[in-house]
Amino acid sequence: MAQDCRSLRPMETDGFQVVTEVVTHKLNHIPIFKGDFASLSPKVQRFVAEKAELMNPAGIYICDGSQKEYDDIVDKLVERGVLTPLKAYENNYLCRTDPRDVARVESKTWMVTKDKYDSVCHTPDGVRPIMGQWMSEEQFGVELDARFPGCMAGRPMYVVPYSMGPIGGPLSKIGIELTDSSYVVLCMRTMTRMGQKVLDALGDQDFVRCIHSVGLPRPVKQKVINHWPCNPEKVMIAHRPKEREIWSFGSGYGGNSILGKKCFALRIACNIGRDEGWLAEHMLIMGVTNPEGEEKFIAAAFPSACGKTNLAMLTPTVPGWKVRVVGDDIAWMKFGADGRLYAINPEAGFFGVAPGTSHKTNAMAMESFQKNSIFTNVAETADGEYFWEGLEKELKEKKGYTDEQLKHLEITNWLGERWHIGDEGKAAHPNSRFTAPAAQCPTIHPDWEAPQGVPIDAIVFGGRRPEGVPLVFESFSWEHGILVGALVKSETTAAAEFTGKNVMHDPMAMRPFMGYNYGKYLEHWIKLGKAPNKAPKIFHVNWFRETKDHKFLWPGFGDNIRVLDWILRRVSGGDEDIAVETAIGYVPKRGTINLDGLPRIDWNELMSIPKAYWEEDIDESRHFLDSQVGSDLPKPIRDELDKLEKRVHSL
Ligand SMILES: Nc1nc2c(ncn2[C@@H]2O[C@H](COP(=O)(O)OP(=O)(O)O)[C@@H](O)[C@H]2O)c(=O)[nH]1
Ligand SMILES: C=C(OP(=O)(O)O)C(=O)O
Ligand SMILES: [Mn+2]
């Protein structure tokens, strides 16, 4: 077989020189482009050798994670036109993908388990589960065979050892990603702790096995667009939780390819968390210090593109407050011996939504990506700056342009076409992203890499809810809070393939990332909150409620500190009289949220709990839980729903 594979191997080897050739019992003469195969642990050797034999790369490149390695790969990609230096900054690059490969693809994401109901709930006949898709092991075998054999022909196979969480930390875990995408290698270096030091820490232990291919072996028969090989027709993002294995094919988009992130740190990790008694959640982690100097930590779950990165990096508009970032997307959380919930950010970088980000909305994100960052599918100005929707005003002021000058500014849009502000279409893709090292954020928390994590005082859920849902409310109990999380809904965004603005269920903000039976997942949450563990209070926020003419009722962004202030006062307890009991939870008493300096806020509209809306919402939610969770719904959650319904009926 090796002989046949070699003959398939085209001449081009991306300019890498063959350093040594290893001969293993599995593999004949696969060249090593970089690294010392023999120094890998037997488990890693075997993994690399087996997968190389399957995918037939031109050679193997073992990443050491050094700056030089990063720079070498960048240089190569610039030479080939994959990356464009954004010359207004130091070490910032623009990458344009094939326009068909710009977001996660939920419909092509699967969990592969022997028993279907380990992955999905017992939904009634004819109902397609939306909390995860299941694929049988047999079918997975067929799909794998139709994609992976020979899929890396002519391309280097990078071996990317990485740690999610600080290397060696008690909550941290190691993975190894094999990929034929050099873009992914660069992103993994920013988003995780990557390289030799991880292999050193690994020893002969096990690791999460991650296999990623863009799915376009050389010689390539189709036309490659933007030097971005991908295979949209054959995309498959498959997870084998029991085997702790991820197989991703056909897409280079971050959420599908930077496998440490959504695939490992959420879908696989929530399985590990279930087995080991902890939680892997789609949550930011932030430290909030009040004017008295007391700091508390909040973990908040919002669906993709609903404000996690922005909240984590918030610049308070109220004097005296300080916000510091621990993480902006994922939290691994475990109750400690003292009964408190501790959270780490398993990542080392930010993969954030670019459009809408500006010094006005998120200055700390802007400061994080002034250097050493990669911008995917944004636009570029003639001066070599990044550009996207939301930067118009800032650019105008920075350059001193008149309106007329701004309108005529030469911009290259994300598709590589000439474009001007006001032209049809968008400058940047709505899901365009920045990839930036977390350490570059000016408000990164000094304990962001604390191996044992930070103690969480409040959990917050939220989503884009244009109507019916007040700015903030507090749940009555841990179980009620879990119901609140289980009923999270949000308008769809550009982070996945859905088009149009529909309000969809996104329970716990985990719909796209659920790694096992969602009913069992709720049970796991319930169990962990029981004494002697001290369960944090659970809140729900909605920055996105609209007036009848579709204007936001709440200014959002830095002003969200006003809501966090209320939340943290509730957490502190004390005898402050700041909450009113309502059917859906405690809401702020009028006047207890600081509105000083804001333009007029329509408090009644912002905080109202319309009975008709909630009655309909509960019917719809009950239908959702019945059809999507069915008999797997834990009784305490069903009881909470019954109680909520009763309270709403008597509104
Ligand atoms: N109106 C409003 N928009 C927000 C707020 N926070 C974030 N956004 C916008 O929502 C989009 C996604 O935000 P981001 O923080 O990247 O979401 P994430 O994907 O959950 O991390 C961006 O376009 C933001 O400008 C807010 O408080 N109010
Ligand atoms: C990385 C992503 O995350 P989020 O939008 O939640 O920041 C994604 O959805 O692809
Ligand atoms: Mn984000």
Image (cartoon, helix red, strand yellow):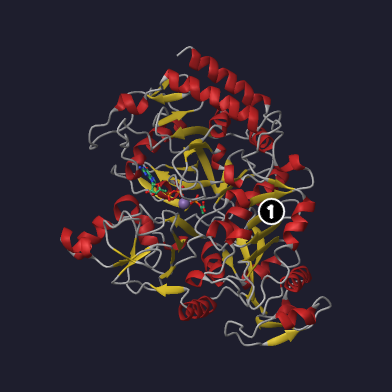
- Left or right, 226 with respect to 150, comes to left
- Left or right, 326 with respect to 343, comes to left
Please tell me which residue is depicted at 44% across the width and 19% down the height of the picture.
Answer: 612
Q: Nearer the viewer, residue 22 or 224?
A: 224
Please tell me which residue is depicted at 56% across the width and 47% down the height of the picture.
Answer: 343
Quarter of the figure with the N terminus:
bottom right
Query: Which corner quadrant of the image does residue 208 belong to?
Result: bottom right
Q: Which SS class for mark 1? A: strand
Please indicate, yes or no, whether residue 98 appears anywhere in the rendered image.
yes
Q: Nearer the viewer, residue 299 or 237?
A: 237
Please tell me which residue is depicted at 37% across the width and 48% down the height of the picture.
Answer: 314
Q: Position of residue 284 (x, y in %)?
A: 49, 47
Is ligand 2 closer than 8 angstroms to the Cβ of mark 1?
A: no
Q: Nearer the viewer, residue 79 or 193?
A: 79
Find disc 1 in the rendering and name its residue. Answer: 239
Q: Position of residue 474 (x, y in %)?
A: 47, 28
Q: Amino acid at mark 1?
A: His
- Tell me if mark 1 has few (under 14), some (14-19) or many (20+) residues whose alpha carbon lies within 10 angstroms of its own: many
Please indicate, yes or no, whether residue 479 appears anywhere in the rendered image.
no
- Left or right, 381 with respect to 210, comes to left
Q: Position of residue 350 (x, y in %)?
A: 47, 58
